[in-house]
């Protein structure tokens, strides 16, 4: 038995028979989700509040003075209770560590509000979009959310631990902990090492990731890890050295997570089949059988989140979109993306599209009603001829739309423009003023 397996087996054997069975069930997707009633929630929230008052934590008091409604919000506190299976003492500790680390990594002015994309630097937004985090579209047989942390990207190899932690704050709290299934069932985390052989010898990626997991398990995020699968490709690295490094990372984790961790090594194909044996759906994985990233499905989870959270500010993402977003999703910079949400609206191809159609608005509106479709056909032809593609998410993949569908969208743009004709057109449509005055958003229907 290798060193890593000895650590994991020891952690499992040290549990009581009941806890050991729970851990094994969690790993093999037959665990139980959290059960709660209205009465239990009401009672535990009241006890949670009393425990918080007894704590008299200075960071918490700072947050209360800044924004009482934030830290006393029912849904905010319920995330921590559920992450700890309604263990009130642990939930309070979790929330206090969350606030304390938020102060450490983001500053005093961010303690009493959620972290936004605009709080992240361009480097951090780039890391978020690089594919390091991915939420699989399908869930496991138990209905749990499956999360990937992938390594090997150039940005991850160069980033500092605090950069990774700041990005993780946004991902784990804003995205993951807001999903009810995550609160009730926890997540299945898959750490998949894609680093180059020379970097794997230095253990750059797993070292950072295990450090992040240790940070998370110090109760910085209200997310419960139900199972952890660490996958490392073999064949180019001394297995003894690799095992020693993985074991060093595993020792950083708490016992209950060690008991739910499985270490897999082999070729990419072997690793993919191993994950299938643990109930991980294969069709919607972010990885191909050869271990490469599926660019067309990358960051779809972020598109969905942004579409559902229209209020979020995106200056950092806007400045980075042209250099990163197109690369990581398989979408070209000059593509026109259809859908809702500011992430779509700020795509460079969408900006070009709106500016082009705006300059031809008078030509379209002045044409007789029967001839407007002809004008729309001509404008669509010019757009496609200049290299722009009309793209839409279809069954979680970006697909190019046919010419007729593209013409319909161009016509819809002008109908929206006419509906807004009684408003300040420049204020609602002109995207070129972003650099001077901040983002100005066009109609949602593009």
Image (cartoon, helix red, strand yellow):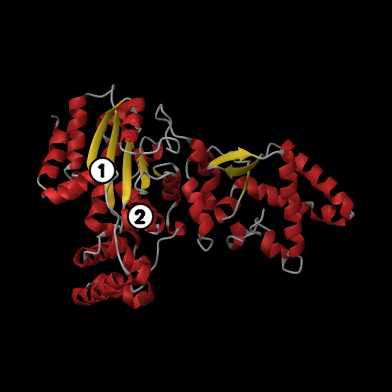
- For the residues bearing labels 1 and 2, Cβ distance under 8 angstroms: no
- Residue at image position (66%, 59%) is 443
- Residue at image position (37%, 45%) is 146
Q: Counting other residues with Cα less than 10 Å from the Cα at mark 2, is it few (<14), some (14-19), or many (20 or more)?
A: many
Which image quarter is the N terminus in?
top left
Residue that sits furthest to the top in the current view: 235
Q: Is residue 158 left or right of residue 51?
A: right
Report helix, strand or loop for mark 1.
helix
Q: Is residue 258 left or right of residue 66?
A: left
Location of residue 355 in the rendering, given as x and y in whole percent from the top left corner: 71, 51
Location of residue 131 in the rendering, given as x and y in whole percent from the top left corner: 43, 41
Above/below status of 61 relative to 237: below
Q: Is residue 269 visible?
A: yes
Above/below status of 409 relative to 312: above
Location of residue 410 in the rendering, given as x and y in whole percent from the top left corner: 74, 49
Q: Along the line of sight, which residue is nearer the eye, 393 or 210? A: 393
Q: Which residue is mark 1?
A: 27
Q: Which residue is mark 2?
A: 182
């Amino acid at each position: 038995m290798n060193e890593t397996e000895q650590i994991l087996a020891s952690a499992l054997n040290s549990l009581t028979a009941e806890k050991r069975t729970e851990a094994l069930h969690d790993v093999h997707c037959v665990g139980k989700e959290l059960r709660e009633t209205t009465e239990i929630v009401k009672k535990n929230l009241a006890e949670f509040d009393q425990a918080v008052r007894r704590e008299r934590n200075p960071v918490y008091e700072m947050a209360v003075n800044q924004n009482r409604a934030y830290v006393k919000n029912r849904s905010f506190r319920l995330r921590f209770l559920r992450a700890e299976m309604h263990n009130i003492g642990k939930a309070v500790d979790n929330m206090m560590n969350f606030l304390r680390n938020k102060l450490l990594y983001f500053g005093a002015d961010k303690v009493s509000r959620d972290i936004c994309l605009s709080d992240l630097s361009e480097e951090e937004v780039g890391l978020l979009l690089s594919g390091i985090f991915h939420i699989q579209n399908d869930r496991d047989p138990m209905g749990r959310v499956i999360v990937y942390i992938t390594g090997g990207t150039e940005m991850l190899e160069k980033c500092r631990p605090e950069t990774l932690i700041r990005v993780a704050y946004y991902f784990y709290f804003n995205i993951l902990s807001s999903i009810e299934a995550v609160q009730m069932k926890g997540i299945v985390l898959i750490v998949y090492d894609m680093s180059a052989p020379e970097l794997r010898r230095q253990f750059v990626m797993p070292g950072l990731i295990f450090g992040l997991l240790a940070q998370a398990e110090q109760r910085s995020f209200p997310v419960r890890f139900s199972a952890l699968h660490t996958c490392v490709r073999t064949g180019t690295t001394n297995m003894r050295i690799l095992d020693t490094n993985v074991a060093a990372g595993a020792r950083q984790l708490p016992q209950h997570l060690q008991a739910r961790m499985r270490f897999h090594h082999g070729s990419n194909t072997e690793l993919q089949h191993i994950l299938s044996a643990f109930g991980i759906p294969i069709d919607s994985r972010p990885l191909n059988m050869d271990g490469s990233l599926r660019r067309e499905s990358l960051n779809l989870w972020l598109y969905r989140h942004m579409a559902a959270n229209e209020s979020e500010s995106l200056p950092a993402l806007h400045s980075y979109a042209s250099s990163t977003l197109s690369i990581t999703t398989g979408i070209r910079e000059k593509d026109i993306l259809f859908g809702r949400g500011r992430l779509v609206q700020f795509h460079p191809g969408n900006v070009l599209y709106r500016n082009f159609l705006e300059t031809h608005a008078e030509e379209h509106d002045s044409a007789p009603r029967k001839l407007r479709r002809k004008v729309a056909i001509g404008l669509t032809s010019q757009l496609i001829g200049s290299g722009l593609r009309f793209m839409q998410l279809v069954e979680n993949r970006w697909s190019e739309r046919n010419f007729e569908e593209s013409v319909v969208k161009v016509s819809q743009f002008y109908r929206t423009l006419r509906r807004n004709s009684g408003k300040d057109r420049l204020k609602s449509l002109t995207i070129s003023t972003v650099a001077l005055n901040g983002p100005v958003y066009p109609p949602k229907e593009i």
